[in-house]
Amino acid sequence: MNQFDKKFDRSVTGTRKWSPVLLSGKIPNKSDIIAMDLADIDFECAPSIKEALVQRALQPDYSYTFIPDEFYDAVIRWNKEHFDLSIEKEWIRLTFGTISALHNIVQALTDVGDSIMIHTPAYAPFSEAVLNNKRKLICNDLKINQNRYYIDFEKMEKQIAENEVKLFILCNPQNPSGRIWTKDELISIGKLCQKYNVLIVSDEIHRDIIFREGDFHSLWKACPEIMNQSIMCVSPNKAFNLGGLKTSYIVIPNPSIKQKVYERLSANYVTSPHVFAVPAIVAAYNNEFSWLRGMVEYIAENQRVVIEFIQEKMPLFIVMEAESSFLTWIYVGNVFDCESKIKDYFDEAGLTIVLGSYFVSNGEGFVRLNIGMQREKVLEALERMKKLYDKILSMRQP
């Protein structure tokens, strides 16, 4: 048996995704719910990470922490070996999560009323980091061509110029679609932001889950000249399922930008890291690349299964093929004309999903499903969807 086929009961671990209390609130009066909404994976943690945490837990001291050199060494080596990025210790800052860091970055580098751009559809907390800090949100809608997202660079430049955009939040790989921006696209983004002196925050937290080796290019690898006016947000959380340990970090080469961000972090009292964060990151980066590759291959096969099943048995649904991550972006607007009907359909199937409207704008008719789970559960979810799909279509026939 593949190690990723192994099931365990996440409902007893305190995880938000599988909490019986929270699930009953999402789909009342429904048993046997399959949770496919929150973006974490349903696989057991990699062995050496568990062992590192056990060993740390056995130490009789959980007081304020500091960050040892082994953390920086692991981060520097991982970025060099797997992304060909040469980063320095002084550029790295461990934070309490990517979105928390994004709020601090927005506060540090922009003023109230400044314009900040995102590509849409986008992870909703991106917009919240803008709007909740009283900045102006500029949405550059991605275009669909042959079931694949593309950037409308002409419109993007016009919006940047007209709104005097100060900061651009890039998501690479893109959430919710799993699209990886090409080297040429990243170069174009870099040149455009250089032209208008726009700072870039490059969120690359899904970059460890890439289906075809060599497809992913970090912004700095594609466009090194943009390093001096950008920040990279990175985390092992998605790949190694460490979200509860707050293991995100930011990388800032520019000393002036770094000082402003660090001052804001200190002002907001982002200080000692989680006591288990450092041992988890070090174990993941130093010991678990083989585990990660196996997990990525398993999820890639899950995606293949989903695409083939839907194409053959639910052809009015359209899956946008992802190039990364464990998230699947599906257009169901050919069957349902409003989101309430979409929600009713998935509720009846007993599947928690994320509706397209969550992703700020430009997500109408879409849903996002998390397939980072045992294949047996993926197939069960698909069968439930098909049963209701067939029922709905049969009722519409004259």
Image (cartoon, rainbow, N blue to C red):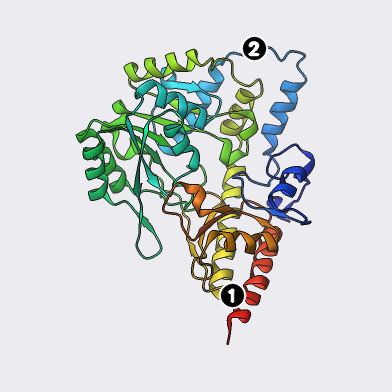
Q: Position of residue 321 (x, y in %)?
A: 47, 60
Residue 274 seen: yes
The N terminus lies in quadrant: bottom right
Circle nearer the N terminus (2, 1):
2
Give the residue type that dot 2 points to.
Tyr
Farthest bottom residue? 398
**As drawn, is 141 to the left or to the right of 17?**
left
Dividing the picture into quarters, in which one does residue 307 lie? bottom right
Q: Is residue 148 left or right of residue 161?
A: right
- Crowdedness near tag 1: few (<14), some (14–19) or many (≥20) residues, C-alpha within 10 Å: some
Q: Position of residue 170 (x, y in %)?
A: 38, 39
Residue 204 appears in view? no
Tell me how far mark 2 sits from mark 1, CA to CA. 55 Å
> Which of these two is toward me, 333 or 59?
333
Q: Which residue is mark 1?
A: 313
Q: Residue at x 63, y 80 (%)?
A: 395
The reply to whether dot 2 and dot 1 touch (C-beta < 8 Å) is: no
Q: Amino acid at mark 1?
A: Lys
Q: Which residue is mark 2?
A: 64
Task: Report x, y in % for residue 120.
Answer: 40, 48
- In the image shown, does 131 or 86 lie closer to the viewer? 131
Q: Residue shown at 62%/25% (left/top)?
A: 277
Assign a secondary structure to mark 2.
loop
For the image shown, how many numbered marks are present on the structure? 2
The quarter of the picture where residue 280 lies is top right
Residue drawn at 71 percent across, 50 percent down? 3
SS label for mark 1: helix
Counting from the top left corner in percent of width and height, residue 73 is at: 51, 23
